[in-house]
């Protein structure tokens, strides 16, 4: 396994894909040579964290069986330090080296607003930056740590500028790469990238931003075809292909991370459209079980 920071080389194009932990289908993606795949974290679904379909097991199976570099998501809200360390110890023992350090969503109060229960009630890290610090304190530079960024600002943040300042805190604490929230317009993402590079100081004037909104131009197209699955799928693929092309042609972006929602076919079509799907390259690993296979065999059924 490699720490993916080293592989996000400037100037070389790449793609990566997010999955939620449900086997199988991972071997299909190995063929297209992603830079990495990441596996989402769902604390409520698997409190013990060690079942064959837990995020850790699935990430380990992708790495150790399919030869795909993986990033394990980990949320800290409501968790004790001891429990987080148990998860991280297990991840380390399975060969995982990349962690996306997240706070996680807060429980909702009676009115549906986030923050119903105290985030720090567990005594563990309250924010993602605290989790990054915990990982650095306990594991030094063993893990390559990623953090989340929000091109439209995080919905709970007082302002876009404030959220950028919090993002910088995560990077200062040891975050080495940023995966952003999904977005609908390339321009929004490109503005975010240049704001991050310019620094938050100049952003005080920017208006408060809240939750993700689907642009009106997109809603106008979707409305008349909302009941036609194929038309919606084709529109999504065409729209996403165009966004990817705009981003890659901007010269500011070299890699693109896909929220696949476990829909392989649409993602693969987009990757083929933009020329990032590389079946012609040799496979990363001979397809043989590694030493860790025993522990993760249940999580992946080879195809
Ligand atoms: P933080 O960076 O801690 O920020 C949360 C809020 O607190 C922000 O508004 C920030 O501005 C503010 N803040 C930060 N530090 C401070 C401070 N010191 N004082 C006051 N305010 C502060 N959720 C899951 O449950 N599982 C997943 O696998 C998962 N994967 C994700 C992947 C990506 C790429 C993204 C973008 C999100 C993901 N999420 C996931 C959702 C995420 O957990 C939520 O968006 C959550 O609300 C915020 O997490 P965070 O790590 O960005 O939090």
Image (cartoon, rainbow, N blue to C red):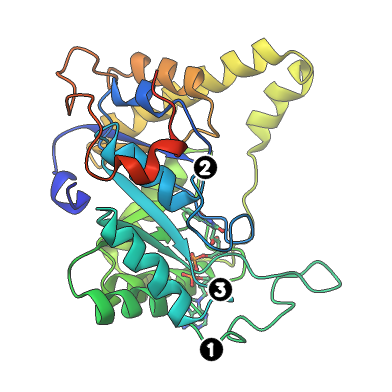
Q: Secondary structure at mark 2?
A: loop
- From this view, report whether residue 300 is shown above or below residue 160: above
What is the quadrant of residue 288 in the picture? top left
Measuring from the top left, give residue 32's x and y in whole percent: 29, 21
Work out whether mark 1 precedes mark 3 in sequence or the reverse, and give the earlier one: 3
Q: Which mark is residue 77?
A: 3
Q: CA distance from mark 2 to mark 1?
A: 27 Å
Which residue, given by chain and number where applicable, does mark 1 sit on? 123
Residue 239: where, in percent of width, then height? 51, 23
Of marks 2 and 1, which one's residue comes earlier in the chain?
Answer: 2
Q: On the rendered structure, is 212 left or right of 196?
A: right
Write the residue at 38% across / 42% down: 296
Q: Is mark 2 within 8 Å of ligand 1?
A: yes
Viewer-proximal residue, 228 or 300? 300
Q: Is residue 32 left or right of residue 301?
A: left
Q: Of 240 and 142, which appears nearest the observer?
A: 142
């Amino acid at each position: 396994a490699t720490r993916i920071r080293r592989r996000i080389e400037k100037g070389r194009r790449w793609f990566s894909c997010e999955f939620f932990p449900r086997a199988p289908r991972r071997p299909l993606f190995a063929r297209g040579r992603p830079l990495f795949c990441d596996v989402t974290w769902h604390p409520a679904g698997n409190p013990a964290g060690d079942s064959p379909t837990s995020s850790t097991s699935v990430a380990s199976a992708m790495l150790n069986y399919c030869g795909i570099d993986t990033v394990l998501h980990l949320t800290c809200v409501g968790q004790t330090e001891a429990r987080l360390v148990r998860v991280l110890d297990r991840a380390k023992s399975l060969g995982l080296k990349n962690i996306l350090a997240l706070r996680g969503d807060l429980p909702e109060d009676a009115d549906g607003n986030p923050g119903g229960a105290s985030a720090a009630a567990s005594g563990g890290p309250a924010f993602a930056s605290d989790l990054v610090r915990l990982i650095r304190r306990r594991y030094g530079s063993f893990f390559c740590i990623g953090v989340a960024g929000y091109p439209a600002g995080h919905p709970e943040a007082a302002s876009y500028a404030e959220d950028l300042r919090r993002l910088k805190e995560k990077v200062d604490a040891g975050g080495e790469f940023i995966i952003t929230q999904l977005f609908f317009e390339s321009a929004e993402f490109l503005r975010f990238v240049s704001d991050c590079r310019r620094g938050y100081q100049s952003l005080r004037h920017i208006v408060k931003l809240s939750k993700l909104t689907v642009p009106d131009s997109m809603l106008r197209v979707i409305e008349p075809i909302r009941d036609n699955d194929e038309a919606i799928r084709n529109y999504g693929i065409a729209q996403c292909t165009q966004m990817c092309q705009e981003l890659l042609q901007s010269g500011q972006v070299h890699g693109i991370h896909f929220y696949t929602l476990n829909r392989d076919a649409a993602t693969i079509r987009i990757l083929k459209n933009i020329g990032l799907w590389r079946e012609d390259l040799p496979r990363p690993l001979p397809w043989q079980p590694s030493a860790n296979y025993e522990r993760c065999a249940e999580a992946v059924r080879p195809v």
